[in-house]
Amino acid sequence: VTYRDDTKVLWLQVASTDMAQHSAVSAAITRQMACGVLASTPEADWSASVTGHLGPRAPADSDGMLFIAVAHRHDGHIDCLSVERQRLTVRGRVARQREAASRLLQAIRQRMEAG
């Protein structure tokens, strides 16, 4: 989880052109975040990323929207296994953070169990 756009670009190899085109809360950026972790961390085999609008000043059309990506390194290749767009069901920033974390952990578990 990286909050600042500059951190996404510098640490996770997210393309700044894609950031400008899609915004930080998008499937494209979430995928790049998950893959960027594995590209920067050769010791890791799994990664996940989450980004979303949790409020309180989120745009009305994307308030509570969340993207989750899970990536896996296998035989030297990095594969982004899934990118999911979800809508949070609770209100309030802290409650949404908890729900987002729970959904992220669930997505990781599902992908790891699937292999």
Image (cartoon, helix red, strand yellow):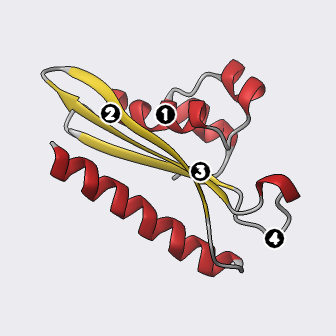
Quick check: 16 above or below 27? above
Inspect this view and state whether residue 59 appears: no
Residue 38 tag number: 2
Kindly identify which residue carries mark 1. Answer: 31
- Label 2 residue SS: helix
Three-letter code, disc 2: Leu
From mark 2 to mark 4, how far is it between C-alphas?
32 Å
Instruction: Please name the residue shown 17% across and 52% down the image.
Output: 113
Quadrant of the image for the C terminus? top left
Q: Within the image, what quadrant is residue 65 found in?
A: bottom right
From mark 4 to mark 1, how far is it between C-alphas?
25 Å
- Label 4 residue SS: loop
1 sits left or right of 59 in the view = left
Q: Earlier in the sequence, mark 4 or mark 3?
A: 3
From mark 1 to mark 3, how far is it between C-alphas?
10 Å
Q: Earlier in the sequence, mark 4 or mark 1?
A: 1
